[in-house]
Image (cartoon, rainbow, N blue to C red):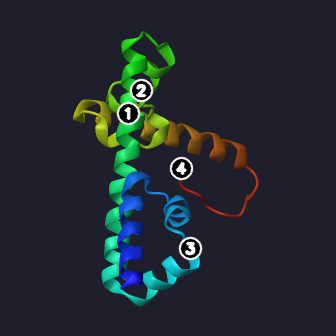
Amino acid sequence: MKKDRVKEEFFSELEKNGIVESACKKCGVSRNSVYRWRKESIRFARRFEESRLIGEGVINDFAEANILRDIQSGSIPSSKYWLDRRHPKFIPRYRGEANKLNDYEKLVLRKEDVAKRKATLAKVMKFMDGWFPDSKREN
């Protein structure tokens, strides 16, 4: 069937870069058709996701190869980019990567966090003194 051939061609193209629009254009099929097929068939939906992930992996490999090539040529920005995302010592703390810390670092950060919270609470309580003279508050 022509429809099956078009679907196979679509999956083949999707595995090259993971971009649905690009695969649709190369196969001459509309995005609406692809998403309708995906909704109608679990088998198509599974194959769609598999092909898309394979395509994303291909592009990720190309991108990583480019970064590594830049690092080898002495590029400081690429080196910083790599370390910020791959080396636990350089991962910025604000990105929520605390799970990459060792146990001692976690404990120190936790103690610092508790101390900061207590200090902030003390400042707030001091600031609020006298606001509610009839209420009994515990510090």
Q: Nearer the viewer, residue 134 or 126?
A: 126
Q: Is residue 90 visible?
A: no
Q: Which residue is mark 2?
A: 67
Upstream in sequence: badge 4 or badge 1: 1
Depth check, mark 3 against mark 1: the one in front is 3
Q: Is residue 33 left or right of residue 62?
A: right
Q: Which residue is mark 1?
A: 64
Say if mark 2 contacts mark 1, CB within 8 Å.
Answer: yes
Amino acid type of disc 2? Ile
Depth check, mark 2 against mark 4: the one in front is 2
Q: CA distance from mark 3 to mark 4?
A: 62 Å
For residue 89, which quarter of the picture?
top left
Depth check, mark 3 against mark 4: the one in front is 3
In the drawing, what numbered circle is on residue 31?
Answer: 3
Q: Is residue 105 above or below residue 98?
A: above
Q: CA distance from mark 4 to mark 1?
A: 54 Å
In the drawing, what numbered circle is on residue 139?
Answer: 4
Amino acid type of disc 4? Asn
Upstream in sequence: badge 2 or badge 3: 3
Say if mark 4 contacts mark 1, CB within 8 Å.
Answer: no
**Structural crowding at the residue carrying mark 1, measured as other residues with C-alpha within 10 Å and reported as few (<14), some (14–19) or many (≥20):** few
* Residue under the image location 54 percent in, 55 percent down: 138
* Residue under the image location 57 percent in, 74 percent down: 30
Amino acid type of disc 3? Arg
